[in-house]
Amino acid sequence: MENTLAATAAVRAVLARRMDEPGALLPILHELQDTLGHIPPDAVQEIAGALNLSRAEVHGVITFYHHFRTEPAGRHVVRICRAEACQAMGADELLVHAQQRLGCAAHGTTKDGAFTLEPAFCLGLCASSPAMAIDDEPHARMTPQAFDALIHETQGLQEAKR
């Protein structure tokens, strides 16, 4: 209940600040994503009403852009580049390996909530592909073995914090 109240308050605060801006929908969605880590499905109606849009229009924008999520992400977000240069250098195989290693599909979260796996459409490391990022920290020239090592290291850091 507390999380729902906090999310509702956040949605209302963002709407109060931004609803009169031209083209306010994307800035509102970005700020909510940044603030809450996701865009709660319950917020769609309130956003639509404030902007005089239909729920379908707001939902369509949320689902069109891969950046937005409607559920909280895991404690760590793993993004694997899906752009052409990375695909040419083995990103498809890396993504398959990541899905097997983490036990979740792209756009999914591991059962323990530790990792969310997302495709990215250019991390700016084209000359060092395939590339990935963990929690926005870029890693280049990735192999399945290097992926496993980074995941293991991240899990170890997570354990050390407990």
Image: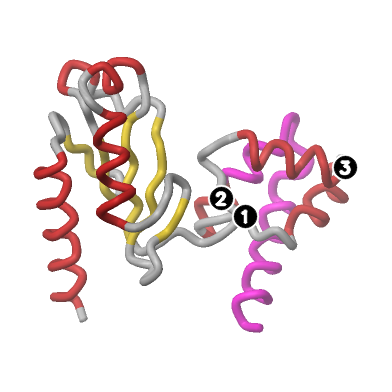
Residue 69, label in figure: 2
**C-beta proximity under 8 Å, tags 1 and 2:** yes
Q: Is residue 57 magenta?
A: no
Part of the protein shown in magenta: 1-30
Could you tell me how far apart the alpha carbons at marks 2 and 3 are, in whole angstroms? 19 Å
> Type of residue at label 1?
Ile
Q: Residue at x 43, y 45 (%)?
A: 106
Q: Position of residue 112 (x, y in %)?
A: 36, 71
> Type of residue at label 3?
Ser
Q: Secondary structure at mark 3?
A: loop
**C-beta proximity under 8 Å, tags 2 and 3:** no
Residue 39, label in figure: 1
Q: Residue at x 40, y 68 (%)?
A: 111
> Quarter of the image holding residue 119?
top left
Q: Position of residue 152 (x, y in %)?
A: 14, 60
Q: Is residue 15 magenta?
A: yes
Q: Position of residue 20 (x, y in %)?
A: 78, 40
The residue wearing badge 3 is 54
Is residue 25 placed above or below 91 in the rendered structure?
A: below
Q: Secondary structure at mark 2?
A: loop
Mark toward the start of the polypeptide (2 vs 3): 3
Mark toward the start of the polypeptide (1 vs 3): 1
| Residue 78 relative to residue 41: left or right | left
Q: Secondary structure at mark 1?
A: loop
Q: Residue at x 27, y 29 (%)?
A: 91
| Residue 98 relative to residue 5: left or right | left
